[in-house]
Image: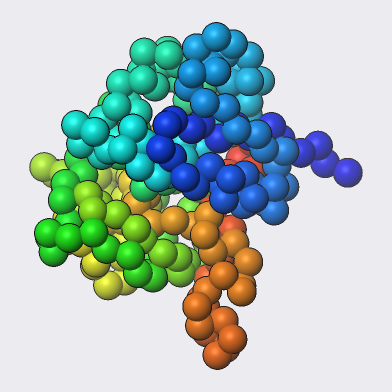
Amino acid sequence: MSVRPRALVLQAPGTNRDHDAVFALELAGADASIASLLDLADDPAPLDAAQLVVVAGGFSHADALGAGRMFALSLDQVIGDRLRAFVDSGGPVIGICNGFQTLVRAGLLPGALGHNASGSFQCEWVTLDPQPGVCVWTEGVEPVDCPIAHGEGRYVHPDVAELERNGQVALRYRRNPNGSDADIAGVCDPTGVVLGLMPHPENHVIARQHPLHVRGGGGGLGLQLFRRGVEHTRRS
């Protein structure tokens, strides 16, 4: 019987998808726990023991000063060096929605996230198409159906062609909901171990979570991404 890797979900005041991420990680084969940045400031041991890290989504610090900004400042101040060392050692990290915004603002992922082209908050289901590249989270993954819930999810980058050459475009929207450059829904760092995406794969890890499940619809589960992250810890 294989040992279940230790996963840590980072939360900040206002995040609201941390328990959903724990549920997804447990289904994917990890033992998961939640730690706030306030707790890690006093005791960083849970992060030091982790083999996989999730930066949870939600509305951290009420999105004061811009989505993800305060979360990123707190993250950098409290565990920035430790998290970078974790990534340098090959540890997988995924940031979802507000967590993606946080990782971008913290400099762990390229590009920026701006207001939706519609100018309004959007909550709907989307289909994500994994792209060939270096991302360990999307390797061998089939298209994923999951919801979005954001007002600042439009991904922009000054040189998308460079990202594509480097294999860092991890996921694309099949139908672009927010005006993101080149339909990009998720990107990874040059090593492929850090993934950020705006949609919420943790909210479609069992079939009945999809609104069309009772009618025979639903598409691919977001659970696939978490399983790939867990598998990577076992290969490392």
Q: Quadrant of residue 64?
A: top left
In screen coordinates, is 109 left or right of 45? left
Residue 187: give x, y in percent of width and height.
33, 46
158 up-or-down from 11: above or below: below
Residue at 54% of width from left, 16% of height from top?
Answer: 40
Residue 36: give x, y in percent of width and height.
52, 26
116 up-or-down from 167: above or below: below
Residue 134 or residue 53, whichever sits in front: 53
Residue at 63% of width from left, 14% of height from top?
Answer: 45
Q: Quadrant of residue 194?
A: top left
Residue 35: give x, y in percent of width and height.
57, 27
Residue at 39% of width from left, 22% of height from top?
Answer: 75
**Residue 211 seen in the figure:** yes
In which quadrant of the rendered image does the N terminus lie? Answer: top right
100 up-or-down from 142: above or below: above
In which quadrant of the rendered image does the C terminus lie? Answer: top right
Residue 2: give x, y in percent of width and height.
82, 41
**Residue 139 seen in the figure:** no
Q: How is the image coloured?
A: rainbow
In screen coordinates, is 26 left or right of 8? right
Residue at 46% of width from left, 36% of height from top?
Answer: 55
Residue 171 or residue 80, whichever sits in front: 80
